[in-house]
Amino acid sequence: MLLEDNRQQGGLGLFGLILFSLLTGIANCVHAQEKLTSSELQGRQLYRRGDPLVVVEVGDTKTQLDGTLFPCANCHGLRGEGKREAGISVPAISAPDLFADSAVRRRYDLKSLKQAIIRGLYPNHRPLSRAMPRYAFTEQQLTRLMAYLQRLGTDVDWDPGIDRAEIRLGTLLPLTGALAETGKLLKATLESCIADLNDRGAIYGRKLTLTALDSGANAEETLLALQNSLLENKVFALVSAYIPVVTADMYRLIEQENLPVISPLSFSPNEDSPLTATFFNFLPSYYDQSRALIEYWIGHVAPKADAEISKLAIVVSDDLQNRKLLPKILTYLKRYPQIELTQSIALHPNQKESVDDLSTLANVQIDAVLFLGNAQEFKHLSPLLADMKNQPVLLSLLELLGGNVLDSPDFSVNKALLATPFAFSKARLDVFRSKLSSQGVELLNPGLQNVACKAVEFVHAGLKQAGKQVSRSSFIDVLKHGNSLNMDFMPALEFSKYSPYGMKGGYVLNIDNKIGYSHRSEWVTVR
């Protein structure tokens, strides 16, 4: 919707017509209520995002276009601030601008109001600017839009989760079930880091608060918790939420609400989904870590002679995320003609069948085995690798195996390369431990606790940069324009408007038990 500036047009256009319809005889549009009504919220959705069912015509063309291509906010701004674009002065249409007494020329009645919006005509039938679209609104949509325009740009026209005193953040964590202790630890960590930032000062008079909900035991329960965060708790953004797999339903809801999702605790984002505009992923995916692992193996460990072929076997656990990961890795391996894939084994839920399948590895000559599974599943593979004459290198992901796997007697391999996103140092651990301790929180999971804390810092910095009139959209734009974040146990994150991933790759832990040799590589970046 592109309203005309009546000072330039000699007529009032939609300024006067909306004023007549809504505020006849009313000079002050400031309402006593503190929140937008349901009808006003629906009007805001229409103003900001349009409606795919609304047909729009622009200029002299009779071509009918999707209403979502021309939402009012595209030209007039999220808060009706206006702008100058392509030589056209787009007027401000916030409530104070639109309904000020100085702008009043009540030349519209209900009939001419509809004519202006739907047909693009002044009351005298003179055309409005060609840049002003014509909208086929229904009566109900028009009523809702008008109701919202009375509130546009006022002190109550805030996105969910924002008011004068606070900005409400949300998180989803496993607060019950097998991972409850980890969930409670992360909740305490988030709360302590938020308290620390609040102690340093408010953000334009607002404090950060946190609402933590149980992420549940499966994707359906996680989706329900996400819905509750948005619809009942009305959080501004999600921070370090435990979402092992983001389903299509979750993506649709997040996109619909334009919800910022800061550092979801997942190594399995749906990288093929186009709906990632509001995501800021701190953790490199299992796929990126696997690629870093393969590149390090090829560059540092595998045979380097031109004529030599490195033989690789892949063993994948019976897990949905790993079954989805396997085809991507197989496609990636086609980049390397020097790698021959000798076998690909998918473990079965039935233990005996898995052992039988793994036994076939003893009859092939291989240089390395890429294992994607947990420590319990690795028990079936570990003794087989130890007994093989040629002693293939184990390639695996430390976050899948579990951080304690190196101390396990089941980890009986001579040589292994393990990818991980974290590189700890005693000095940094001591500083972080002291910071948490000052808030009464114990350091038990340095990697995830650090990520959770850094996510809060990232949000805090973005909110300050976005300004007092922050919205979800302006906040996301700020974060995507060259923002970087130093991480204590990971490389610095770099976000841009082109990618929701702050980093791609991993460190590689190089283990050789025969000579007692172990070190981490430099960070391996993958493209």
Image (cartoon, rainbow, N blue to C red):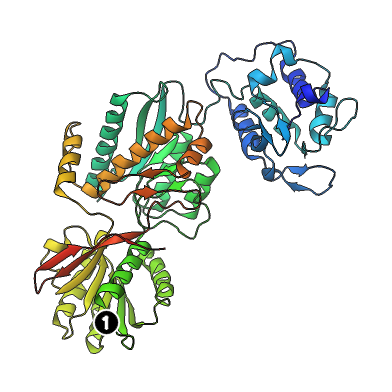
The vertical placement of 168 against 179, above or below, is above
In this picture, residue 464 sits left or right of residue 313 = right
Measured as percent of width and height from the top left, residue 214 is found at 34, 42
Quadrant in which the C terminus appears: bottom left
Amino acid type at image mark 1: Pro
Measured as percent of width and height from the top left, residue 50 is found at 66, 40
Is there any visible trace of residue 155 in the rendered image? yes
Quadrant in which the N terminus appears: top right
Q: Quadrant of residue 330?
A: bottom left
Measured as percent of width and height from the top left, residue 423 is found at 22, 54
Q: Quadrant of residue 402?
A: bottom left
Q: Secondary structure at mark 1?
A: loop
In this picture, residue 13 sits left or right of residue 215 = right
Q: Nearer the viewer, residue 253 or 126?
A: 126
In this picture, residue 172 sits left or right of residue 77 = left
Badge 1: how crowded within 10 Å, few (<14), some, or many (20+)?
Answer: some
Residue of label 1: 303
The vertical placement of 315 against 46, above or below, is below
Q: Nearer the viewer, residue 380 or 329?
A: 329
Residue at the (48%, 25%) spot, across then down? 468
In this picture, residue 104 sits left or right of residue 381 = right
Residue at the (51%, 31%) spot, across then down? 159
Q: Nearer the viewer, residue 422 or 30?
A: 422
Is there any visible trace of residue 317 in the rendered image? no
The vertical placement of 509 against 335, above or below, is above
Residue at the (68%, 33%) spot, across then down? 84
Q: Nearer the viewer, residue 216 or 496?
A: 496
Measured as percent of width and height from the top left, residue 226 is found at 43, 43
